Image (spheres, coloured by chain):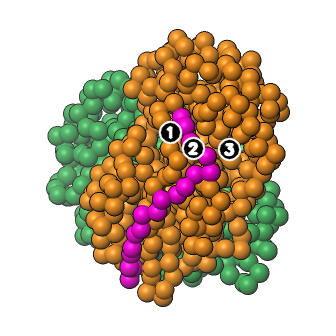
Chain colours: A green, B orange
Amino acid sequence: MITSEFERVSLPLADAFTISRGSKETAENVVVRLTDEGGMTGHGAAAPSPHYGETADTVEAVLPDLLDVVESVGDPHALDRVERRTRDRVHDNPAAHAAVSVALHDLATKRLGVPLYRLWGLDPDECPPTSFTVGLDTVDRVREKTADAVDAGYPVLKLKLGTDRDAELLEAVRDAAPDVTLRVDANEAWSPREAVERSRLLAEHDVEFVEQPVPAENPEGMRFVYERSAVPVAVDEAVETLADVPRVADYCDVVNLKLMKCGGLREAHRMIHAARAHGLEVMLGCMIETNAAIAAACHLAPLLDYADLDGALLLADDGDPYDGLDLSDGVIRLPDDRSGTGAEPI
Amino acid sequence: MITSEFERVSLPLADAFTISRGSKETAENVVVRLTDEGGMTGHGAAAPSPHYGETADTVEAVLPDLLDVVESVGDPHALDRVERRTRDRVHDNPAAHAAVSVALHDLATKRLGVPLYRLWGLDPDECPPTSFTVGLDTVDRVREKTADAVDAGYPVLKLKLGTDRDAELLEAVRDAAPDVTLRVDANEAWSPREAVERSRLLAEHDVEFVEQPVPAENPEGMRFVYERSAVPVAVDEAVETLADVPRVADYCDVVNLKLMKCGGLREAHRMIHAARAHGLEVMLGCMIETNAAIAAACHLAPLLDYADLDGALLLADDGDPYDGLDLSDGVIRLPDDRSGTGAEPI
């Protein structure tokens, strides 16, 4: 027996968060709670992105249908049956599906008394550190935010680019953080020729790789960049679900997966394995998310080359209704003393 | 804490088993037992195949190294760590690795008190039936064996072909079993042109698909057949591990995976997901195997389109030191009342 409820939460950010497509000061998430007959509760959350057709409103609109399936299946361990039936009932809407997936995995592993990563047999010592994202801002503010991130001990930064100030921003970041591992994300802002040109600038600033330099709708442009770029190329917007992996495999080095794009923890596993079959490196990213969602993503970290799971780190102090895993210094510490995802309501 | 032991077992077959490459009357398996500090034991087994470079002797030769890793890791739930370290220690030798993988999964899920399929969240109602294999023999014996299999209620038969009697054997089988679902396996016996020609005969006898019509070493030949065959084409010998999946994806309809080719349950999962990314259908096959190995493979059945898990059904009565799952009528019945794989020593 499972009962369910959901609740919209408005998460204030520590700083306005800006990428090449826009800016925001709060993130709207929708929390899902699933409770079994013994009163044990699994928590999950949707962090919808309009770029993938979802808002908090659409999530709230489809969750009753999804949760109806969960309740009618009634077995927290029947992860496959719930996934198959919820997908049959509601197409697309990946963040809403992800909320259900996370809550169900949290509940199932709490019932078994194991942390989520142990359900999957993963090795907690194999987690790469998470990057910390520095959004678009004035050059001075980017320098300041970078210095703060370095002070906080983050060993990997991800810089958002995609304006006519790219060169200045890179310079400011390298000035404030000469030694951090640096990745950049253009969020589709460049043309293929621009991307190749900028890649030389990125290489000069010792950038590890560049994410989604050109629009996802332009695979030939991605291939053009991939063949000429001075730094490795990751795709993000171009890879949403499993069938996308073979499609992008011959024009990128890294795939950036997200629970909120692919619809849940089972699909993320499938995508990671398909990417490995193609010899791709794997990164797991996130939206701006409550710990109720981020904590689950962290349990996948042992399977990753790169983690970008700072979604809850960008929230204002006391801005998250959930306590999560300890990610200080960017180190993903999977708990061995807490079952489930390790996220708990405050 | 884990202690380990292994033992070679000689399994007498009910009938001599013949394919296009050769014949045998017993199968040599090597059973692995892993026991935790509480005295709980997980069971697995290797069913080595010389075609993939293994014999019972090679399995016995490498198991001490593999089991040394298992004991030094000492945690039955650390499936990934054991897999990574055993692969680092001993390359190839997939059946030996599979024995360790199965025993460890059996032990881990016994400790959690759940059947193996529930660790993976799979739906026991989604298992396809297993096929029952009719090996090469005289036309009269093939007709008799087919009639026996029909009497036993097997709804799917797999006929071994690859001699100059293919047409007669097909006729005899369809004569004795006009209504069963029929698959055929040529085990690399045909040339590409022969395979295309035979495919018309297969279509006339309502064959569901043909497995490995031409040698695995001839991908262009496989492509030639795939583009011209009158029935769908499966690959078996051509797909061993994860990296093979994208390679074969554009010249087959079905991939036939086996624990004893890929090295274990985690790699099988990865391969299934990679195959799905390419829109391939998935079959799981086996060698001639004790229930200690077959039972674990059965727990993957909900992820399959086609199951060919009759390895223990081909053994003589009382020929298996392990009781397994109930596969009567070819129905794979995953137990909800037994934790682990469900195989138990007699």
Q: Residues within 10 Å of mark 2 (few under 14, many from 20)?
A: some
> Mark 1–mark 2 contact, CB under 8 Å?
yes
- What's the distance in space between the residues labelled 1 and 3, CA to CA? 17 Å
Does residue A238 appear anywhere in the picture? no
Q: Label 3, secondary structure: give it.
A: strand
Question: Which of the numbered marks, if any, corresponds to residue B16?
Answer: 2
Residue at 34%, 61% in the rendered image: B60
Above or below, comparing residue B267 to residue A213 in the picture: below
Per the image, label 2 sits on a secondary structure element best described as strand
- Kindly identify which numbered label has been placed on residue A252: none
Depth-wise, is mark 3 or mark 2 nearer the camera? 2
Instruction: State yes or no: residue A282 in magenta.
Output: no
Q: Is residue B2 magenta?
A: yes
Q: Nearer the viewer, residue B278 or A129?
A: B278
Name the residue at 51% across, 51% down.
B26
Q: Are marks 3 and 2 on the same chain?
A: yes
Please name the predominant secondary structure of the magenta segment in the image.
Answer: strand
Q: Front-most of A1 and B271?
A: B271
Residue at the disc numbered 1:
B23
Residue B209 seen by the camera: yes
Look at the numbered disc 1 and give the secondary structure of its residue: strand
Disc 1: CA contacts within 10 A as few (<14), some (14-19) or many (>=20): few
What's the magenta region? B1-19
Picture quadrant where residue B213 is located = top right
Q: Can you tell which mark lies on residue B132?
A: 3
| Amino acid identity at mark 3 | Phe
